[in-house]
Amino acid sequence: MTTALNILIIGGGQMGSAIALGFIRSSAKISIIIVEPDLDRRIEITDTGIIAVKETPNPITSEVIILATPPHIFPLLSELHPQLQHFTGVIVSVMAGVSLSELTTRLNRTQVFRSIPNLACSINQGTTLSIPGPQVTRKNEDLINRIFSTLGTSTFVTKEHLLNSATALVGGGPAYISYFTAALIEYAKTAGFDNASATSMVIQILRGTSALLEAGPDTPMRLCEKVMTPGGTTQKAINHFNHMQIRTSIVDGLKQSFLHSVELGRRSWR
């Protein structure tokens, strides 16, 4: 990004802060201000070197606003941030479930996007899926793609329902991996390893496996099969996982997350 860009993030929760940290840590010329009403949270954000303010600046001088508030706050957004009615730039929502039609109607804007990033954006290893509003200009689409690319990978989709699926997969992905990681560490500790050694081993296993999958050509299950010796120790564990229908449970869990994303959107529209 060759020219400086000013971004205002409304909402200093985990996702809003992760996005801000990623922008600050990138090589792009991006200036960030976070609007966060909670004093303790503002102090935490300021301690990371990011400007955090209690109220939305008046006038808003930023070119892009990222809405990172909880979905149930959305119906109150114009009341809480009346300055938005005079904003003429690009608005990006990272709120789960809030549709493009809701964004364009309630905000009375055409240059709006829905995006689903994840917490790895904070270290510029994130995944972001986005969809532009129907009247978004190519210039603004390129702009949003460029800024989210500084946080990791940026992909645009053409079907909005995929954003709810992305909420389950992309947004929640770090939680699922961390959940499985915690189980591996727990096993290592019960086997006698200290916490530091257990954590270090498991993280390296995750890192190495990710590298193998990225290098290819094996699919995840093909790599799984390569590790298993017929009748061996690893197969014993996988057989148990299959008996407990763990893969099915994971898929079903993500489906529940997807459905809840849809429900959150319905609530925000009421």
Image (spheres, helix red, strand yellow):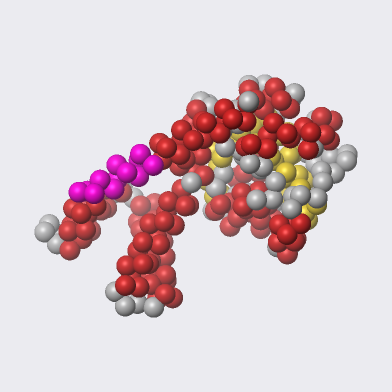
The picture places residue 192, in percent across and down from the top left corner, at 31, 78
Residue at 76% across, 44% down? 8
* Residue 101 forms part of the magenta stretch: no
Residue 88 falls left or right of residue 206: right
167, above or below 42, in the image: above
Q: Is residue 208 visible?
A: no
Q: Position of residue 156 (x, y in %)?
A: 55, 33
- Answer yes or no: is residue 212 visible: yes
Q: Locate residue 91, reporting x and y percent.
A: 71, 34
Q: With 81 as the anchor, is 219 left or right in this view?
A: left
Q: Position of residue 28 (x, y in %)?
A: 69, 51
Between 202 and 83, the one nearer to me in the picture: 83
| Count of number-bearing discs | 0
Please say whether residue 243 is one of the residues in the magenta stretch. Answer: yes
Q: Residue furthest left?
A: 231
Q: Give the residue at x 78% y 38%.
A: 80
Q: Main secondary structure of the magenta part?
A: helix
Residue sitting at 81 percent across and 43 percent down?
A: 56
Q: Residue at x 73, y 39 (%)?
A: 65
Check the picture and name the quadrant holding the C terminus: top right
Q: Which residues are magenta?
A: 242-253
Q: Nearer the viewer, residue 138 or 61?
A: 61
From the viewer's perspective, tell me whether residue 180 is left or right of residue 81: left
